Amino acid sequence: MKMKAKIYLGLALVSLSIASCKKAKFGDPVILVTGTEVSPIVKFTVENTPSEFSVTATSTYKADEDINVKFELDTAAISRYNAEHKTTYFVVPQDAIDITNLSTVIKAGSSASTPVSVKVISTSPLIDGRSYLIPLSIKQVDGGNMNVMESSRTIFLRIARVIGFPALSMNNSTGPTTGSPGTRGRFNATSIFATPVTLTNFTLEIKNLVYAFRSGDGNTNPQPIQTLISWSGATGASIGLRYGELGNPNNSLQLIGSLGGAFAYGFNPMQWYTISIAYDGSKGIMYVDGNKVAELPGSIVMEFSQLNLGQNWGGYDTRQYFNGRIAECRVWNRALTPGEIKLNLCGADPNAPGLVAYWKFNEGTGSKFFNSSKEGSKYDMDWTKVYWDNNGDDVFDPVVDKSQYVTWTNDALNKCSQ
């Protein structure tokens, strides 16, 4: 029996070409950009510069002759992708990359081309909070009599910077654990803003890391409960997050407040997580790192004017203090999509539409936490002038100074790759 000149490479890949290639018929050989079979967006991790990524073309059958493939930097493809998928990717600045040769060849008898070298030579032109793509498309194919699989004509290299950052630790226990407000040895307090904002739709976010989850019961000091944060307003509406609510695993996270209660489970110590609560006017959805974990129907209008970090009730500060770090706290006046949330895991564009307040908590020194959004200094926080509910009666005592309990961290734990 005479063997076929073209050797079949794989049922899954050819099946994909049948389903996706607009011009190919059953069993026809096609050419595609390697690695785009499932998604055209491929992660390009950049920790140091220069960093290099090799882009190749693949044929679904071995080539009978040399096939010359020419790529192009197809920046218009990003606009088309954003429009189709409702994303906000940015075109990488030209001075951040180096691509010296866009021509490649699939040699006769092979199914993979020689590589095109794509280098990120500098991250300085990249704006924090933006997700950048390097779009390479197959522009021309000469030889081989193969069509291009249209769904895999373009590869989008998503620059995933490995970012180190200072972060704020809320576990300062160097001072006494009892005493008058402001001298309890804990960071916990409330910042009040003079300019409330009405939120009929919103997204609230906080990035956090827990050092360790506590055991024990409601009679211990400290308790398993670790109060992380609450966003609240003058009308009483609030949304809060706390770990280890009694009766649930200590490494579970509870959403509490005006929308009701919900839980997320299975958190690991010494690991960063971004928690997002998106409310679209009829329901709130809680996300962990952009993945939906709970949904709560309901109606809420928040006159946001207060940010509470930790447990600010007297007597509970030492019982329910948060044993960990925080970064990237945001308030939006719209419900973000899961895709938007995932793009913002390491940081958000300060000029993004709908971003009301944005505390990166990356100052690294001092006791002031600055707002990075377009709203500016009216949402700055100064831990020398914060508030405390000493009696647990929802009445704030006179302003206190908690600057001595602000602790900054900047070590190997504080890294993010997006």
Image (tube, rainbow, N blue to C red):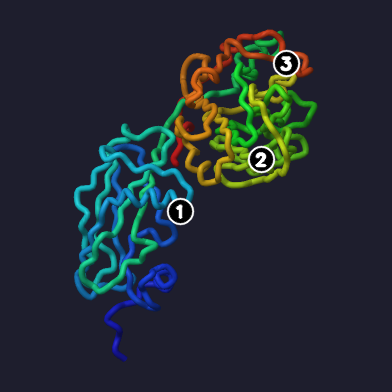
Element at label 3: loop
Element at label 2: loop
- Quick one: 47 or 258, which is closer to the camera? 258
- Quick one: 201 or 57, which is closer to the camera? 201
Residue corresponding to mark 1: 84
Of the residues under marks 2 and 3, which one precedes in the sequence? 2
Quadrant location of the C terminus in the rendered image: top left
Residue corresponding to mark 3: 389
- Quick one: 321 or 156, which is closer to the camera? 156
249 to the left or right of 45: right
Dots 1 and 2: beta carbons under 8 Å?
A: no
Determine the residue positioned at 73% across, 33% down: 258
Q: Please, what is the three-letter code of the amino acid marked with disc 2?
A: Gly
In the rendered image, the vertical position of residue 84 relative to residue 69, given as above or below: above
Dots 3 and 1: beta carbons under 8 Å?
A: no
Determine the residue positioned at 67% across, 38% down: 253
Of the residues under marks 3 and 1, which one precedes in the sequence? 1
Q: CA distance from mark 3 to mark 1?
A: 49 Å
Q: Please, what is the three-letter code of the amino acid marked with disc 3?
A: Asp
Element at label 1: helix
Q: CA distance from mark 1 to mark 2?
A: 25 Å
Residue corresponding to mark 2: 281
In the rendered image, the vertical position of residue 54 relative to residue 316, given as above or below: below
